[in-house]
Image: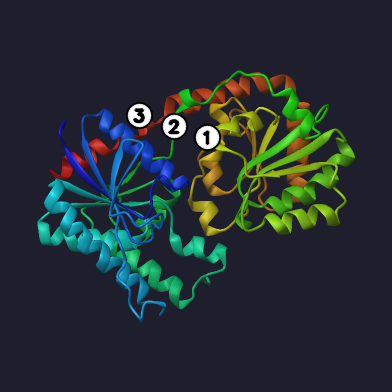
């Protein structure tokens, strides 16, 4: 299938940084290694300058400008504007790029625009579901589970699943939910999240100066690096620290990043009198992230139970395993797809402070066994969760359409 021409339809892209854009960049890189030609268009939600076209890291992106409308502020006018403007832009890009396949990625608005353009140009559409955006909206407080907006968003995506020629998704949890909507199981292919293991170093000494600067000398460091959303359960982690330090006074917590819960977390640290045990340096430059990872002994991911976390696999635990780090995570469905307890990490009962504390204490007590666990975690990433293996799964999807 060398020479296959694919037009990817995206919500946003690099140079913006998010898990969404990093997954896209890795997919495009690997598809090009296979000899496939990829073109790329983003919808009007990508707001990063006003250029109609843009080159970023060797990739050419077509941008979509949303037409202004005095009705656009109404809740269900804006999505229609997004779909219509993107569909119109796709007509232009298809004429120029002559793709053989349209590959639309979440959200469903992109799928609807691609289906519209695909019908006009006689092109098959692959729709890739990376998450259910209505569930993310519930966590962000912009929607209510079971509310009108939630149900309409869900119905729109279900229609895209039915009308697309093929469906891909990132994990078994999402696949199961899609099948439960009446979509044929053989129409859905899992293309799992992965990491480029070669970009993560297994060895490397912690930066002694940075350790001193952060006040972490002589501490056993628990860590979390990422975005501070409510579903990540970081408040539970902070509250568990007080109980944990009664058994292991040498333990400190390093929280690197930022987000909607940052102010609440800082306030909770003060309320619990943990200022001397919790270090929150904020967001750090991308090129320094690995320096912070090296300071951490146990990476903790205390995600709470909700549809989003039970259905979707996160990327951070894979990045941790790629660096040979020990992972302690809640037993939500997304984590259970990645972590084999006692082999590649530890799982504790989601939402339970006692279980979190007990599991961390057990992990510390089993420190002599960490070497084997580090190797097994790295082997899992290299063997099963690398981008080359993951992206190769697109080949039969495209072949079946052509």
- Circle 2 — which element? loop
Residue 367, image quadrant? top right
Residue 171 in sight in this render: no
Q: Which numbered disc, 1 or 3, marks the residue that appears first in the sequence? A: 1
At horizontal 16% and vertical 30% (from top left) the residue drawn is 2
Front-most of residues 296 and 95: 95
Q: Position of residue 336 (x, y in %)?
A: 55, 42
Residue on which the image places disc 1: 318
Disc 2 residue crowd, few under 14, some 14–19, many 20+, Cα 10 Å? many
Residue 80 relative to residue 342: left or right: left
Report if the CB atoms under discs 1 and 2 are less than 8 Å apart: yes
Q: Measured along the vertical axis of the image, is residue 230 above or below residue 335?
A: below
Q: Compute the Cα span from label 1 to label 3.
A: 15 Å
Disc 1 residue crowd, few under 14, some 14–19, many 20+, Cα 10 Å? many
Residue 100 in sight in this render: yes
Front-most of residues 302 and 234: 234
Residue on which the image places disc 2: 385
Disc 3 residue crowd, few under 14, some 14–19, many 20+, Cα 10 Å? many
Q: Position of residue 14 (x, y in %)?
A: 40, 45
Q: Measured along the vertical axis of the image, is residue 22 above or below residue 124?
A: above
Report if the CB atoms under discs 2 and 3 are less than 8 Å apart: no
* Labelled disc at residue 388: 3
Q: Position of residue 91 (x, y in %)?
A: 16, 59
- Circle 3 — which element? helix
At horizontal 73% and vertical 31% (from top left) the residue drawn is 363
């Amino acid at each position: 299938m060398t020479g296959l021409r694919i037009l990817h339809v995206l919500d946003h892209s690099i140079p913006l940084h998010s898990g969404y854009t990093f997954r896209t960049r890795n997919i495009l890189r690997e598809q090009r290694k296979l000899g496939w030609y990829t073109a790329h268009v983003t919808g009007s939600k990508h707001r990063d300058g006003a250029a109609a076209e843009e080159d970023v890291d060797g990739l050419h992106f077509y941008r979509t400008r949303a037409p202004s409308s005095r009705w656009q502020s109404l809740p269900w006018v804006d999505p229609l504007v997004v779909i219509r403007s993107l569909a119109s832009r796709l007509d232009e890009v298809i004429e120029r790029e002559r793709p053989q396949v349209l590959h639309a990625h979440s959200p469903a608005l992109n799928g609807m625009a691609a289906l519209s353009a695909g019908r006009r140009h006689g092109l098959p559409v692959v729709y890739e579901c990376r998450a259910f955006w209505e569930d993310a909206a519930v966590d962000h407080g912009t929607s209510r589970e079971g509310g009108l907006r939630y149900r309409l968003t869900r119905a729109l995506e279900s229609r895209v699943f039915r009308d697309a020629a093929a469906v891909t998704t990132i994990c078994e949890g999402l696949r199961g939910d899609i099948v439960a909507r009446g979509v044929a199981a053989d129409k859905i292919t899992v293309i799992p999240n992965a990491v480029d293991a070669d970009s993560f170093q297994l060895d490397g000494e912690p930066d002694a100066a940075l350790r001193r600067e952060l006040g972490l000398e002589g501490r056993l460091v628990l860590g979390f690096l990422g975005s501070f959303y409510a579903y990540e359960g970081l408040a539970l982690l902070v509250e568990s620290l007080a109980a944990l330090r009664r058994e292991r006074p040498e333990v400190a917590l390093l929280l690197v990043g930022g987000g909607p819960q940052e102010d609440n977390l800082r306030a909770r640290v003060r309320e619990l009198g943990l200022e001397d045990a919790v270090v929150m340096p904020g967001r750090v430059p991308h090129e320094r992230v690995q320096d912070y990872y090296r300071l951490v002994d146990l990476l903790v991911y205390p995600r709470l139970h909700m549809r989003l976390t039970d259905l979707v696999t996160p990327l951070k635990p894979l990045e941790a395993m790629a660096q040979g780090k020990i992972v302690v995570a809640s037993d939500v469905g997304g984590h259970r797809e990645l972590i084999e307890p006692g082999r590649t990490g530890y799982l504790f009962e989601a939402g339970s402070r006692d279980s979190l504390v007990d599991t961390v204490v057990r992990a510390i007590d089993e420190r002599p066994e960490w070497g084997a666990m580090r190797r097994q975690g790295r082997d899992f990433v290299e063997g099963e969760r690398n981008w080359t293996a993951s992206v190769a799964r697109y080949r039969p999807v495209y072949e079946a359409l052509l």
